[in-house]
């Protein structure tokens, strides 16, 4: 399941070189089951990168383009109970093909850091491990839609609890969408799929278990990205107060 880097920026042993502000940006994805905190931590990371002078493009899948958002509405609509699993796969891949050609490729070519909430790993976890589609089929579909683009680094957020608790957290402030309405057993299979993906590609996929304090989780994420952005090490070691606003916002809710 291992893939090449999105651009020719790897050494012979596969290690990434520092790409800060150089042509060809960095593509970082956030993955995980429902309620893992992907959106919160992607937002905090984006702000940190912007403060340090990077152009940041934040995206979500499916979505991120006009076409992608229309496809997202279809695939997540609870009313679409008859949507077939092959149709579902193709909708995700269509949205991905559009966001890659319209947004991700151009952003990387001009040197931006692209942060995406879900990408092709989610399709493997949900469609293969969750739905039971063939791994070979889904991987071929991913290859076609990704058009040679693959994440440089993936942060896999886990909750350290049951899938049901994650679902409860995810739907606390909104009505459940079509996927969130799937049973806990489905989402346990999805989470197991993410674990398998991480084990098969540990250099790219870094597992971060969500801590009780969001600030601690964010520190762990920065730790897993500090080889790409060395200035993150200073924040972790010398400026712990930098992460404190995450907990303040939580306390105010």
Image (cartoon, rainbow, N blue to C red):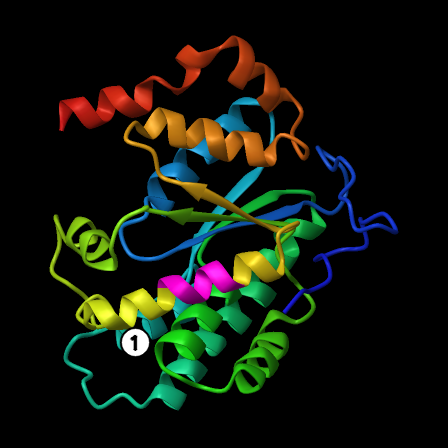
Query: Quarter holding the N terminus?
Result: bottom right
Q: Residue at x 67, y 35 (%)?
A: 228
Q: Residue at x 43, y 59 (%)?
A: 64
Q: Is residue 22 above or below residue 116?
A: above
Residue 162 can be seen, yes or no: yes
Q: Residue furthest right?
A: 12
Residue 119 can be seen, yes or no: no
Q: How many marks?
A: 1
Magenta region, mostly helix, strand or loop? helix
Q: Is residue 79 left or right of residue 148?
A: left
Q: Is residue 83 left or right of residue 5?
A: left
Instruction: Please provide percent x and percent y for residue 73.
Output: 27, 71
Q: Is residue 17 left or right of residue 59?
A: right
Which sits in the foreground, 110 or 249?
249
Query: Quarter holding the C terminus?
Result: top left
Look at the numbered disc 1 and give the secondary structure of its residue: helix
Q: Quadrant of residue 67?
A: bottom left
Which sits in the foreground, 109 or 12?
12
Q: Is residue 138 above or below residue 250?
A: below
Instruction: Please provide percent x and percent y for residue 180.
Output: 21, 66
Q: Residue at x 32, y 30 (%)?
A: 214
Assess whether residue 181 is covered by the magenta stretch: no
Q: Residue furthest top?
A: 238
Instruction: Please provide percent x and percent y for residue 186.
Output: 27, 72
Q: Quadrant of residue 44?
A: top left
Residue that numbered label 1 is attached to: 75
Q: Which residues are magenta?
A: 191-196
Which sits in the foreground, 196 or 37?
196
Q: Residue at x 71, y 33 (%)?
A: 21
Instruction: Please provide percent x and percent y for residue 135.
Output: 53, 81
């Amino acid at each position: 399941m291992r893939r090449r880097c999105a651009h020719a920026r790897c050494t012979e042993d596969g290690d990434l070189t520092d790409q800060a502000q150089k042509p060809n940006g960095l593509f970082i994805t956030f993955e995980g089951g429902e309620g893992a905190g992907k959106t919160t931590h992607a937002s905090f990371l984006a702000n940190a990168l912007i403060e340090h002078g990077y152009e940041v493009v934040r995206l979500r899948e499916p979505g991120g383009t006009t076409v992608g958002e229309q496809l997202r509405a279809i695939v997540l609509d609870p009313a679409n109970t008859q949507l077939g699993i092959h149709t579902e796969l193709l909708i995700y891949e269509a949205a991905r093909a559009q966001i890659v050609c319209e947004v991700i490729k151009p952003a990387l070519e001009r040197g931006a850091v692209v942060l995406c909430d879900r990408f092709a790993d989610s399709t493997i976890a949900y469609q293969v491990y969750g739905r039971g589609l063939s791994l070979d089929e889904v991987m071929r579909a991913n290859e076609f839609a990704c058009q040679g683009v693959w994440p440089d680094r993936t942060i896999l957020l886990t909750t350290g609890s049951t899938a049901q608790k994650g679902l409860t957290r995810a739907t606390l402030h909104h009505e459940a969408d079509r996927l969130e309405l799937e049973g806990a057993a489905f989402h346990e299979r999805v989470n197991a799929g993410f674990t398998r993906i991480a084990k098969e590609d540990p250099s790219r996929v870094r597992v971060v278990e969500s801590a009780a304090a969001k600030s601690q989780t964010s520190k762990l994420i920065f730790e897993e990205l500090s080889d790409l952005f060395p200035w993150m090490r200073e924040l972790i070691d010398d400026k712990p107060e930098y992460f404190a606003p995450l907990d303040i916002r939580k306390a105010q809710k």
